[in-house]
Every structure is written in structure tokens, then in C-alpha cells.
Amino acid sequence: MSEKGVREETENLHCAYMRRRRLQRIAIILTQGIILIAALGLWEVGASAGWFNDFLTSQPSKIWALGLRMLRDGSLLHHTTVTFVETMLGFAAGAILGVLVAILLWWSPFVARVLDPYLVVANSTPKIALGPIFYVWLGDSLSVYGMALSISVIVTIMMVYTGFRDVDPNRVKLLRTFGANKGQILRKVVFPASVPTIMSSIKVNISLTLIGVIVGEFISSRAGLGYLIIYGGQVSAWIWSCSAWWC
């Protein structure tokens, strides 16, 4: 077979492979959409047919109507904005502080050994239990940021520090043989090699920070998605208790 024929055959195989990949992605998206629509349809039909208590589970049509009403009066946008700002600020503070502490631990093995048991205990401590403490220490608004920071910073420290330690030691030895100091090793090898780990910690921490913000809003906030959840739960409990008492 000539060189031109080989090239055409390769291009045909590549096009066939890309076509299969595209069809596979379309099939995955369609399947995900079908599962979502089926779940929402079953939820709607089950609530309407009385298969379960729609007061406790509500139903998609009611949730949609309430969402549109809150969107029109601006309350949904207000509470979403509050939670978004708190999440972004808490996430940024946790990421920056976590990376700086991880650099300190890598820089000084003595400090790393001293702080290791404290980091393990801090990571294993249920952060929800710290909510009342932050409320007493920091007050209404700042306690939300305290919760967000307490969740994100520990995970960032441990993940980034582990990434620093897992850098190929041969690269570090090579720079040391050329007389590089710690700062140069950090800038030229350790930090660039740990970028995938840092990005992974960012992906994990953005969701953890949101959880911390929601929990903080449960306890002290007067705005945000956590406040809406607590307010809705209290109203539902009050209506349920009143209906049970009248019955």
C-alpha cells in the first residue's frame, strides 16, 4: 500500500474513532437526561397519586412554581448571591492559607512533625460541632466564614503538602547538586509538579466550602440558602404541628 493510501486509511480510522466517541458522548448525555426526567416524572406522579406524603416531599411542579415566584420578587437572587459571595471568600481564604501552610510544612520538616498530630485531629473533628463555638467567638456574620474556612483549609493543607512530598526526589537531588537553594527548588520543581494536586484540592474544596457556608447559615445567618432551608423547615414543622393538633 502506498504512502497516500496509508495516510487515507489512518485518517479514516481516526474519523471513525472520533465518530464513535461523539456518539458515545451523545448516548451518555441522552441517558442522563432520560434518568433525570424519569425520576422527576415519578416524583410528580407519586406525589399527585398519593403514593407518599407530598407535604413532606413536595413535588417538582410546586418547587418550580415557588422558584419562579421567588425569582420574580428577587428573594431567590438575594439569598443565592449572599451564599455565593460567602462561598467564594471562604474558598479563596482557605486555598491561600492552606497553600501557605503547606509550603511552611514542606520548608521545615521540624514544623511538619510538630503539627502532624494536630492536623490529623483537626481533619477528623466534625466541623459541624464547631458551629456554635464560631458563633460565640465570631458573632453572626463572621461565624459563617469561620465554618467555611475550617472545612477548606485543613483539606487544602493536607492535600497540597502530600503533593509536595510526592514530587520525584531525583529532580530535587538534581537541583541540589547544582547548588539550588530551597526557594529555587520550590519554584522550579516542587510547586510546578504539584499543580495537578493543587487543582484537585480546589475542585474538592469548592464543594466543601459551600457545605461549610450552608452549615454556618443554619446556625447564625439571616440570609442565604442555608437560612432558606432552615426557615422552610421551621415553617413546615409549624404547619405540620398545627394540622396535627387540629386533627
Image: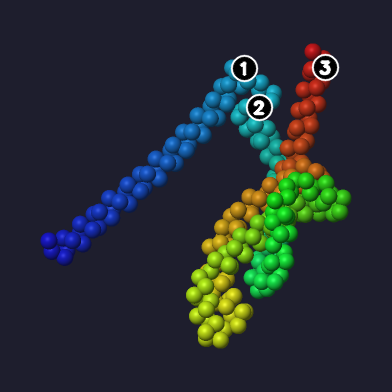
Residue indicated by mark 1: 50
Amino acid under disc 3: Trp
Give the spatial CA distance, label 2 vs label 1: 11 Å
Which element is circle 1 on?
Answer: loop
Give the spatial CA distance, label 3 vs label 2: 21 Å
- Residue that extends furthest to the left in the rendered view of this protein: 1
Amino acid under disc 1: Gly
**Earlier-in-chain disc, 3 versus 2:** 2
- Which percent across, then down, holds residue 53? 66, 21
Query: Image point 79% across, 32% down: which residue?
Result: 234
Q: Is residue 22 above or below residue 191?
A: above
Query: Image point 25% across, 58% down: which residue?
Result: 11
Residue indicated by mark 3: 245
Which of the two residues, 230 or 99, is positioned nearer the viewer here? Answer: 99
Q: Quadrant of the C terminus?
A: top right
- Which percent across, then down, holds residue 163? 57, 64
Residue indicated by mark 2: 57
- Which percent across, then down, holds residue 236? 76, 28
Label 2 Cα crowd, 10 Å radius (few <14 / some 14-19 / many 20+): few
